[in-house]
Amino acid sequence: MIERAELLQQVITVLRGPCGVSENILESSRLGEDLRLDSMGHLALAVNIENHFRVRLEEDPTAPPRTVAEVVDLLQLTLESKSSS
């Protein structure tokens, strides 16, 4: 299983690269308010994570991830469910 710190680093890499975030990125950073991700930025984040890990993120459309930590949590749960199937 991939360690949480490695997942966090991969999410930060995507935020810095394809999403173009230049702000300081912390686990507590809010995607919209702190990192200024718009809807296209959210989409780029999800697509790049899905492609890198070869998974499908199944977030609740009524409660999408709002922070970097929530993205990492979602990715971790997705990977755990993938490995147990």
Image (spheres, rainbow, N blue to C red):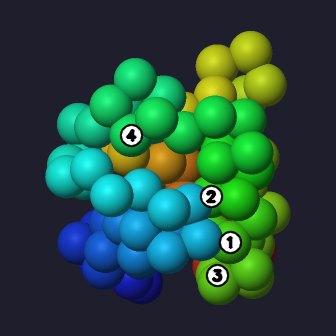
Contact flag, marks 2 and 1 (Cβ < 8 Å): yes
Element type where label 4 sits in the image: loop
Sequence order check, earlier mark of 1 and 4: 4
Tally the marks. 4
The amino acid type, in three-letter code, at marker 2 is Leu
Q: Nearer the viewer, mark 4 or mark 3?
A: 4
Where does residue 8 sit, x and y in percent of width and height? 32, 66
Q: Nearer the viewer, mark 3 or mark 1?
A: 1
Disc 2 versus disc 1: distance between alpha carbons?
Answer: 5 Å
Sequence order check, earlier mark of 2 and 3: 2
Disc 4 crowd, CA 10 A, few/some/many (<14, 14-19, 20+): many
Note whether 10 is above or below 57 in the view shown. Answer: below
The amino acid type, in three-letter code, at marker 4 is Leu
> Mark 1 highlights which residue?
48
Q: Which mark is residue 53?
A: 3
Q: Which mark is residue 35?
A: 4
The amino acid type, in three-letter code, at marker 1 is Asn
Write the residue at 42% across / 56% down: 21
Disc 4 versus disc 3: distance between alpha carbons?
Answer: 23 Å
